[in-house]
Amino acid sequence: MYNIVSKIIAFQRPTTLYIRSQMPINKIRLLILWSCFLTITAYAQDTELDVLSYKLTIEPNIQNQSIEASLLIQFEVADGTEKIALDASNLEIDGVSGTSVLSYNKVGSKLVIELSPQNQTQHELTIEYHGKPKRGLLFNPDLNQAHTVYFTDQWMVCNNQPSDRATFFLNIILPKGMQSIASGSSLGVEDKGEKALHKWHQDYETPPYTYGFVIGSFTEATEQIGDVKLHYYSSELDEYKLKEVFTETANILEFFEQKSGLEYVQDSYSQILIGDNYQEMSGLSVLAKAYPPFVFKDSSEIHLTSHELAHQWWGNMITCEDFGHFWLNEAFAVYMSSAFSEHKFGLKKYQSDIAIYKNIYDDLVKRGKDRPLIFKEWRPSRDNRNVIYYKGAYVLHLLREELGDEAFWKGIRSYSTRYFGKSVKTEDFKLAMEKATSTNLDDFFDTWVYK
């Protein structure tokens, strides 16, 4: 935590949480969140495995805090590949079937599947499983709600490598009368007697950590901006208050479209006030129920709304190739949030944000905790996260000063349009900015990024 004048800002992941000095801090909750995140390690990249699509049918039991699921995976591997490994956390595997499946074995958190020798590169297999997710799918039996946050392999067998992008089909079996909000577009609800089948389809590719869903009963408010329908959900606020909380969403979306040079990829975007977490997912974001009072008190306190929405471009669609380049996701979301604040509330607000990021960076330097923005092996810690979030955002500010406004935003548009729907390394960003601005950035990147 950092005391900076009257503000304290810190991010916690998998939830993204700005903590202001006026906000009561539940230390136990923060420790739990940190202990959850610290269990993440950088995944070894399996360059042979390319998942093409996941087709999941899942039945959550909120009261029992458990799931049962059937997953069809279509994937491609090099001809002659003998086995693949998928991330399955603590899920219990009931069976794996497919014409090319010889055997399977659960080794720790990995599901290892042996393939028969076949003269083909594309395969299809079905995995039946059940489990009680420890995190990643959070249940609230009292409110009869559940929602996902970040750890997709806690509720779906997948390849966690962020460079492996795939389409996503999701069928959720729920009691009648419940609502679902999920990644992709709704294909409707099918009657299943006492239950209902909620069908969703994301027809563009993103990494599995961006998939997600929310289930429960909510009040809904909607707005239309061009071809995009905005949805706001809460189990506590009415429609009027929901629109007040998210009043800037349409402006933020238009701002990011302008700065990226790219239209928002879906026909809808949902924001759900639920639980204690802040997390972007493909086509939706969850924000803690504690968030609205800060917007009601100060209408400029919309960093969380803009940060999570920024990820719909920088993070979900333009994704770090591996977690060693994680700053390309998170520093961009932090910086773009401040850029919108400048656009909406003026230069003074932007400068205030940058001063906070610089103070955090200066503190890292003072304590000997500064390090390059690129990690050979990503190990989450408070200091490492401050490097990629806040030093990273400060570096983007310095790059803007180095290039000037016109050239900087020209470079951002060029980078964004070039790599939209793709995975990126830091060098890709550097080269895109150099080409767009006809500027050699070797010294800048050597000073601020690599060293």
Image: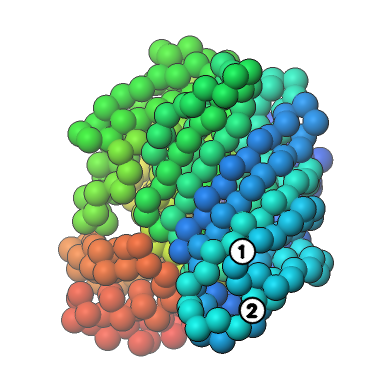
Return the residue nearer the eye: 433 or 397: 433
Disc 1 is placed on an element classified as loop
- Asked if residue 213 is positioned above or below residue 84 in the image, the reply reads above
Give residue 232's position: percent from left, percent from top: 44, 26
Q: CA distance from mark 2 to mark 1?
A: 10 Å
Q: Is residue 151 left or right of residue 246?
A: right
Residue 12 got which mark?
none
Residue identifier under label 1: 98
Q: Evaluate whether residue 134 shows in this view.
A: yes
Disc 2 is placed on an element classified as loop
Give residue 101's position: percent from left, percent from top: 65, 70
Three-letter amino acid code at the position of disc 2: Ser
Return the residue nearer the eye: 374 or 189: 189
Q: Is residue 36 left or right of residue 259?
A: right
Three-letter amino acid code at the position of disc 1: Gly
Q: How many other residues sit within 10 Å of disc 2, few (<14), some (14-19) or many (≥20)? A: some
Give the residue drawn at x 69%, y 20%: 143
Give the residue drawn at x 61%, y 22%: 195
Give the residue drawn at x 28%, y 35%: 228
Disc with the residue nearer the chain's start (2 vs 1) = 1
Q: Evaluate whether residue 246 shows in this view.
A: no
- Asked if residue 346 is positioned above or below residue 292 in the image, the reply reads below
Q: How many other residues sit within 10 Å of disc 1, few (<14), some (14-19) or many (≥20)? A: some
- Asked if residue 293 is positioned above or below residue 41 in the image, the reply reads above
Residue 116 got which mark?
2
Q: Is residue 171 left or right of residue 142?
A: left
Give residue 99's position: percent from left, percent from top: 60, 67
Give the residue drawn at x 41%, y 13%: 240
Give residue 311's position: percent from left, percent from top: 43, 51
- Please say if the residues under marks 2 and 1 sit with CB atoms less than 8 Å apart: no
